[in-house]
């Protein structure tokens, strides 16, 4: 039960944070919510969540081979993970999400197509691996003592966190409708970026605090 309580909030947070930046997939979900309705957009997000889950599995699989190194250098890894997270936050803060409108794929005709385009658009960006590694390290998500059922639960919570995010986004956009504009998207992106930068700063401070105490 102790491991379950450790995993649950971290997994939900990681799943939501992976999905939150307003890149091409975020813009596509918003476009489809406005043009096709909430559920086609939500299934686009489900496809993106499945792609993110695969990258999370790859990250966790690689980390499982170096558990001894992770255990011996836990503070260093948390600091590096926080720096990666902060760098991504700075990049996100400076990025204009409206440019992604040009690269977003056209609307699909059914839920399976929506899911497929969401999956392919997200899977085509392997750089997300660095972001996931930073999140895993920042949250110290994979512990050496985890057993198989802990790993299954961990990745289930990540997927659930991503689904919750897309459910929230599609519900919000569907409710606000035409009041969503380019300026509000840029503000959302910057708020998310500031949250990531704040998490990175807190991570470095806590790692140094643990090191001295």
Image (cartoon, rainbow, N blue to C red):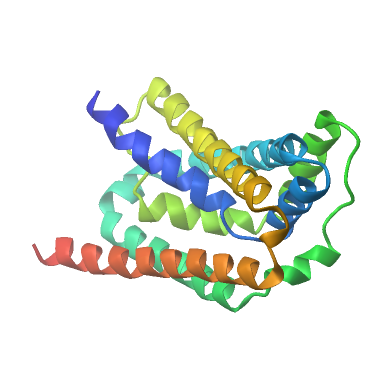
Q: Nearer the viewer, residue 68 or 39?
A: 39
Q: Residue at x 76, y 65 (%)?
A: 100
Rendering coords of residue 164 (x, y %): 53, 38
Rendering coords of residue 153 (x, y %): 43, 26
Residue 193 in the image: above or below residue 68:
below
Residue 196 in the image: above or below residue 138:
below
Can residue 124 be seen here? The reply is no
Q: Residue at x 68, y 74 (%)?
A: 96
Q: Nearer the viewer, residue 51 or 181?
A: 181
Q: Give the total number of marks visible in the rendering.
A: 0
Residue 98 in the image: above or below residue 46:
below
Rendering coords of residue 151 (x, y %): 43, 29
Query: In the orientation shown, which residue stands out farthest toward the bottom?
Result: 94
Q: Quadrant of the C terminus?
A: bottom left
Q: Nearer the viewer, residue 189 or 208?
A: 189
Rendering coords of residue 185 (x, y %): 64, 66
Q: Quadrant of the N terminus?
A: top left
Image-based side of 152 in relation to 125, left or right? left
Residue 37 in the image: above or below residue 29:
above
Q: Residue at x 59, y 79 (%)?
A: 94
Q: Nearer the viewer, residue 67 or 19?
A: 19
Q: Quadrant of residue 111?
A: top right
Can residue 136 be seen here? The reply is yes
């Amino acid at each position: 039960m102790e491991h379950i309580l450790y995993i649950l909030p971290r997994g939900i947070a990681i799943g939501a944070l992976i999905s939150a930046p307003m890149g091409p997939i975020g813009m596509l979900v918003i476009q489809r919510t406005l043009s096709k309705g909430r559920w086609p957009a939500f299934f686009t997000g489900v496809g993106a969540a499945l792609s993110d889950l695969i990258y999370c599995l790859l990250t966790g699989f690689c980390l499982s081979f170096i558990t001894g190194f992770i255990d011996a250098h836990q503070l260093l890894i948390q600091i590096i993970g926080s720096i990666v997270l902060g760098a991504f936050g700075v990049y996100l803060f400076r990025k204009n999400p409206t440019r992604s409108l040009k690269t977003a794929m056209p609307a699909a005709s059914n839920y399976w197509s929506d899911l497929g385009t969401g999956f392919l658009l997200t899977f085509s960006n392997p750089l997300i691996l660095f972001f996931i590694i930073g999140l895993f390290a920042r949250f110290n998500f994979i512990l050496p003592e985890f057993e198989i059922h802990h790993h299954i639960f961990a990745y289930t919570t990540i997927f659930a966190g991503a689904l919750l995010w897309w459910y929230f986004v599609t519900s919000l956009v569907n409710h606000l409708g035409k009041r969503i504009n380019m300026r509000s998207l840029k503000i959302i992106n910057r708020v998310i970026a500031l949250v990531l930068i704040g998490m990175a700063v807190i991570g470095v401070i806590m790692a140094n605090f643990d090191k001295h105490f």
